Amino acid sequence: MVVAAAEQICYDRENPESARLLAVHGAEVILVPNACGVGKQLLDQFATRAVENGVDMVMANHVGFGMNGNSPAYDFAGRAVHEPVEGAEGLFFARLDIPALREYRSSSLGQGLRNFSSRPGLCNLQQSPAFNGNTGALSRFNVPL
């Protein structure tokens, strides 16, 4: 089975728009390498990103140097597929139910959460003047790879 995965850096999870952009563009699973102390507030935030975007979210967090592990995996309904364990170092596995995710996304609720037709400017960076070719404020990032 092919799964559409995307990646965020740890700071991206602080902003709902970054997860929304990835989900709107087809991401089914969002992977987040992380490097900070992870407590209840950040775990709740992470589960919320899964629910509000209809995606599975997986975080890998460092242990040591002020970072405490707590690497979770949440499904699209915010259920913990892998419970975070404070201070745990190792390789952890989580079984993601991609067929259930796809069924949810095709339901009326899943479609409703991902419908942006009533907000056409939302999550479309190309409409932003900041990304306007060689003249926008962010034009220095328009560099071919």
Image: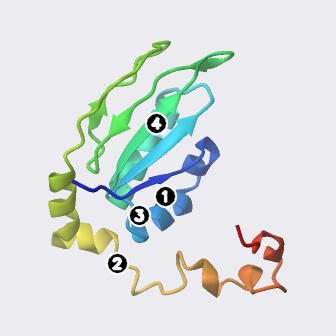
Check the image and report above or below for 95 versus 114.
above
Which marked residue is nearer to the observer: mark 2 or mark 1? 1
x, y (%) of residue 110?
24, 66
Check the image and report above or below for 136 versus 28.
below
Mark 2 is surrounded, within 10 Å at the Cα level, by few (under 14), some (14 to 19) or many (20 or more) other residues, namely few
Which marked residue is nearer to the observer: mark 4 or mark 2? 4
Looking at this view, is 93 or 21 the one in front?
93
Which amino acid type corresponds to the residue marked 1 in the rendered image?
Ala
Is tag 4's residue or tag 3's residue first in the polypeptide sequence? 3
x, y (%) of residue 47?
38, 43
Is tag 3's residue or tag 2's residue first in the polypeptide sequence? 3
* Residue at which label 4 appears: 59
Which amino acid type corresponds to the residue marked 2 in the rendered image?
Asn
* Residue at which label 3 appears: 23
Q: CA distance from mark 3 to mark 1?
A: 6 Å
Which amino acid type corresponds to the residue marked 4 in the rendered image?
Met
Mark 2: secondary structure: loop
Q: CA distance from mark 4 to mark 1?
A: 13 Å
* Residue at which label 1 appears: 19
Question: Which residue shows up at 30% across the image and 55% down it?
Answer: 3
